[in-house]
Amino acid sequence: MADKRRKRNLFDNLFGTDSYEDIEGMIDHMFNEMGINMDELLNQPFVYGFSVTQRPGEEPDIREFGNVPPEMMSGERDEQKINIGERKPLVDVLETDDNVHVVAEMPGIEKEDICLDATDSSVELKATHGEREYFEHIELPAKVDPNSAKATYKNGVLEVIFKRQETEKKTSIQIK
């Protein structure tokens, strides 16, 4: 005798005919809970990433970048909203015996839109072009002479080279 019972698909109970509408509703609800405006999200990139650097004999240095606050990635619910327009550039700081190199990736920015301010121990990087905004405060690993800074910007990559020194001054830097 043939079994006339209909074989049930494993996913029949999990996904009904309205499954796509239900999933869309859940996603909309999650974004609303995080304070994300879906219209802004669809028109602006949602960026999050990290860079890992490890020197021999040292602990790895993990740096986050993007426009998502770290609290949002860790699952903590705070009243802080995501600023879709502002991003953290990917920054690498390299040392040599005589110099400190700061390299920042900021695609979509023009050289004229970048503002750099430096002290002997830090660099503040700001850039705005249209709706793209970058901001980062970078602590330097050694004291530098801010007046010795040489900055270049090409193909979305900013490179600033400082000579090491033991004085504290703040100065603006011109980009070539």
Image (cartoon, rainbow, N blue to C red):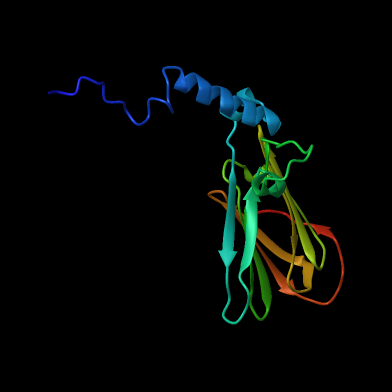
**Image quadrant assignment for residue 164:** bottom right
Q: Residue at x 14, y 23 (%)?
A: 2
Q: Quadrant of the N terminus?
A: top left
Q: Is 160 displayed left or right of 148 in the figure?
A: left
Q: Please say if 32 is above or below 82.
A: above
**Image quadrant assignment for residue 28:** top right
Rendering coords of residue 44 (x, y %): 60, 31
Rendering coords of residue 119 (x, y %): 82, 63
Rendering coords of residue 165 (x, y %): 79, 76
Q: Is 11 displayed left or right of 84 in the figure?
A: left
Q: Residue at x 46, y 17 (%)?
A: 18
Could you tell me if residue 43 is visible in this image? Answer: no
Rendering coords of residue 111 (x, y %): 64, 46
Could you tell me if residue 45 is visible in this image? Answer: yes
Residue lying at the far front in this picture: please name it: 1
Residue lying at the far right in this picture: please name it: 168
**Image quadrant assignment for residue 99:** bottom right
Q: Please say if 139 is above or below 33.
A: below
Q: Please say if 83 is above or below 92.
A: above
Q: Residue at x 72, y 54 (%)?
A: 174
Observer-nearest of 50 and 115 = 50
Q: Residue at x 79, y 37 (%)?
A: 79
Q: Quadrant of the C terminus?
A: bottom right
Q: Please say if 83 is above or below 156.
A: above
Q: How many marks on residues? A: 0
Observer-nearest of 160 and 73 = 73
